[in-house]
Image (cartoon, rainbow, N blue to C red):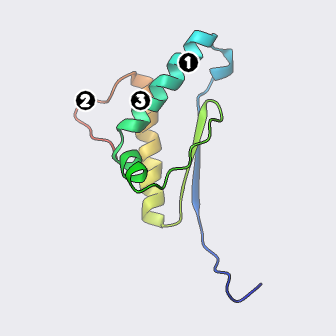
């Protein structure tokens, strides 16, 4: 391995909408719109967007998040759990702020 190459550990999380392919087209659109709304409300998304650190690829009903710092990896896990909770409840959980 070349001396100028540094190795890093990355924490990668994937999220998928279960049962998406079984939904009617209109319902798929509604679910994706809801997912986008919830994600855009999060502080993490807004900070990354402001810093120009987002990579967006339209890939269907899922999303991927990654970070190289362990603390940020844990925050990412908490963020994905919060997003899933919001989608299950179809609203923002009362008394909570986005991670």
x then y, percent, for residue 77: 47, 49
Instruction: Write down the residue under mark 1.
Output: 29
Whichever of labels 2 and 1 marks the residue nearer the N terminus, that label is 1
Q: Position of residue 99 (x, y in %)?
A: 34, 47
Q: Secondary structure at mark 3?
A: helix
Secondary element type, mark 2? loop
Q: Residue at x 63, y 12 (%)?
A: 25
- Against 32, residue 81 (above or below) is below
Disc 2 crowd rating (10 Å Cα; few below 14, some 14-19, many 20+) is few
What residue is shown with label 3?
Answer: 37
The mark nearer the N terminus, 3 or 1, is: 1
Residue at 45% from the left image edge and 54% from the top image edge = 52
Q: Residue furthest left?
A: 95
Placement of 5 over or under 12, stated as above or below: below
Give left or right: position of 98 versus 11: left
State the image quarter where residue 88 is shown: top left
Residues at marks 3 and 1, CA–CA distance in whole angstroms: 12 Å
* Residue beneath disc 2: 94
Q: Is residue 74 above or below residue 62?
A: below
Judged by depth in the image, the label closer to the viewer, 2 or 3, is: 3
Q: Is residue 38 left or right of residue 15?
A: left
In the foreground, 51 or 36: 51
Q: Quote the CA–CA distance across marks 2 and 1.
A: 25 Å
Q: Nearer the viewer, mark 2 or mark 1?
A: 1
């Amino acid at each position: 391995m070349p001396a100028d190459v540094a190795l890093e550990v990355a924490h990668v999380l994937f999220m998928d909408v279960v049962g998406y392919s079984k939904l009617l087209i209109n319902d798929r659109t509604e679910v994706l719109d809801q997912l986008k709304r919830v994600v855009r409300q999060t502080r993490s998304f807004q900070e990354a967007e402001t810093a120009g650190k987002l990579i967006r690829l339209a890939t269907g009903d899922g999303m991927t998040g990654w970070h190289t710092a362990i603390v940020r990896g844990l925050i990412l896990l908490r963020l994905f759990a919060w997003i899933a909770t919001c989608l299950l409840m179809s609203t923002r959980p009362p008394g909570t702020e986005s991670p």
